[in-house]
Image: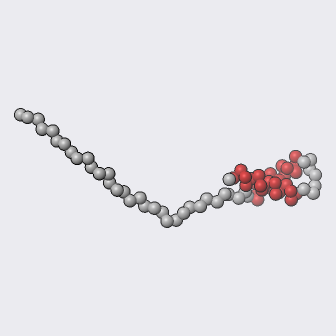
C-alpha cells in the first residue's frame, strides 16, 4: 500500500483586535504627608543644635527632599 503524505498550506496569522483603553492613567507623584515633613524638619533642627529662627527653611528643605525622593 503506498504511503500518502498530506501537505498543508501555511495559515495566515489571525488578526487580533486589541482593545485600547481610551482613558489615560496619569501617575502623580505622591506628596509627602504633614507628619513626614515635620519629622524631617525636626531632624534638621536637631542637627543644627536646636537653634531657633530657621523653622521655615527647615520645613521647605524637608518638603523638597521628600518630593525629590518620591519622584
For residue 43, side relative to residue 51 (left or right): left
Q: What x and y, as percent, mark residue 52?
A: 93, 55
- Single out the residue that lies furthest toward the bottom: 22
Q: Residue furthest left?
A: 1
Could you tell me which residue is drawn at 43 percent across and 61 percent down? Answer: 19
**One can see residue 39 in this view:** no
Q: In front: 58, or 5?
A: 5
Which residue occupies 56% across, 61% down?
Answer: 25
Question: Could you tell whether 56 is left or right of 20 in the image?
Answer: right
Q: Position of residue 55 (x, y in %)?
A: 88, 57
Q: How is the image coloured?
A: secondary structure
Image quarter where the N terminus lies is top left
- Is 68 placed left or right of 12 in the picture? right
Is residue 42 shown left or right of residue 67? right
The image shows residue 7 at horizontal and vertical percentages of 19, 42
Q: Residue at x 27, y 49 (%)?
A: 11
Count of residue discs: 0
How far across and how far down the image is residue 35, in percent?
77, 56
Who is closer to the viewer here, 12 or 51?
12
In percent of the image, x 84 and y 49: which residue is there? 43
Name the outermost residue toward the top: 1
Whether 22 is drawn above or below 70: the answer is below
User: Can residue 32 be seen here?
Assistant: yes
Amino acid at each position: 500500500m503506498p504511503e500518502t503524505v498530506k501537505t498543508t498550506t501555511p495559515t495566515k496569522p489571525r488578526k487580533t483586535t486589541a482593545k485600547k483603553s481610551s482613558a489615560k492613567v496619569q501617575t502623580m507623584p505622591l506628596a509627602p504627608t504633614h507628619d513626614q515633613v515635620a519629622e524631617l524638619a525636626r531632624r534638621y533642627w536637631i542637627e543644627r543644635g536646636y537653634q531657633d529662627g530657621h523653622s521655615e527653611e527647615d520645613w521647605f528643605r524637608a518638603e523638597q527632599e521628600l518630593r525629590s525622593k518620591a519622584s
